[in-house]
Amino acid sequence: MGIIAVITNPNAKRNRKERERADNLRRILGDRGEVVETPVPEDLTPVVERLVKYDIDVLCVCGGDGTMQHTLTAFINAYGGELPPLVLPLRGGTMNTIRRSVGLNGSAEDNLAATVRKYDNGEPFAITTRDIMCANGKYCFLFGNGLVANFLDVYYGSPYDGPTAALYVITGGIGSLLFRGKMYHRLYDPLNCRVFLDDQELPVRQFMGVLACTVLDLGMGFKPMYRAEEKDGTMHVLASGLKPGKLVRNLGKMYKGRLIKDENHIDRLASQIYIEGEKVHKWQADGEVYEAKDLKVTMGPLVRIITGC
């Protein structure tokens, strides 16, 4: 029998409010494995190098989507491009899209306790599989640049948290269409770039952004990536050259996961994206915002995620 490894980020939003969480998880886990706190991504390197020497059966990640992205990237690299352990996302951060997309509910403590019980009793786990993407070396389930990354940048800088912050950005973004103020330029400045899907260049040259996902739910009920789980080995890609006003008018369709029919809005499955930008711009991987001029997104390994706890 192997071990259960728990990586927890004490700086993730919910974990900051629950300072005793790491100790709670240690009590639940007992001698079945190890709980390790990694306050910053750089802390992961020595932890992962040590833990991969063991036979990890279950890898638990307690934090938000950003913590998942950093942790899975580190482990996939350590395993040479694969991820043998089952993965259990434990709620602990600001954004918990990955958990929600696979139907996980409950607290981190309850989820871990249920998993430990099944582990001890040798019961099979209820699991689902999801493809993961590799965007400029970052393994993620959600990738986006342009408006997608700009939205998060404004979201993180807002005076609010959670759904209130998202509503602040959405309403501010819609209102800014009338006045073309600071919010307008922060959100809607277009990207001049060349975009290739599976080596086929798209006919559009100016984009609001490119979004790619292998999960359906983007939060707040938005499910524009209605084909994300359609075919193994692919990602659902929206590459939109719609003008801001037209894009906003189609929010209802995006919310419901309906096709937007427009020659400047590309909606398809792909296994690779290559973006040649005119300049450095913001992009995001599972909620973590970065900057780059050129971007390459390819398919990574299948991730087996525990759902029945």
Image (cartoon, rainbow, N blue to C red):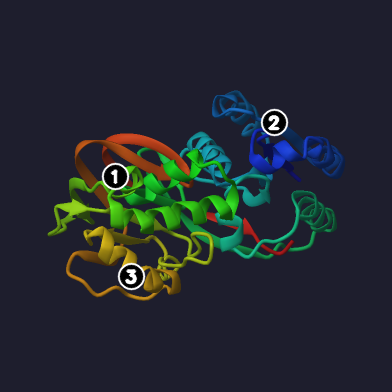
| Disc 3 element | loop
Circle 2 sits on which residue?
Answer: 37
Q: Please say if 193 is above or below 34.
A: below
User: Mark 3 against mark 2, which lies toward the viewer?
Assistant: 3
Query: In this orientation, which residue lies closer to the viewer: 225 or 30?
Result: 225
Labels in figure, total: 3
- Indicate which disc residue 250 carries: 3
Query: In this orientation, which residue lies closer to the viewer: 255 or 309?
Result: 255
Q: Indicate which disc, 3 or 2, sits on the residue closer to the N terminus.
A: 2
Residue drawn at point x = 58 percent, y = 40 percent: 67
| Disc 2 element | strand
**Within 10 Å of the Cα at label 3, are there few (<14), some (14-19), or many (20+) other Cα atoms?**
some
Could you tell whether 42 is left or right of 260 in the image? right
Could you tell whether 59 is left or right of 171 in the image? right
Q: Is residue 299 visible from the viewing direction of this image? A: no
Could you tell whether 174 is left or right of 244 in the image? right
User: Mark 3 against mark 1, which lies toward the viewer?
Assistant: 1
Amino acid on which the number 2 mark rests in the picture: Glu
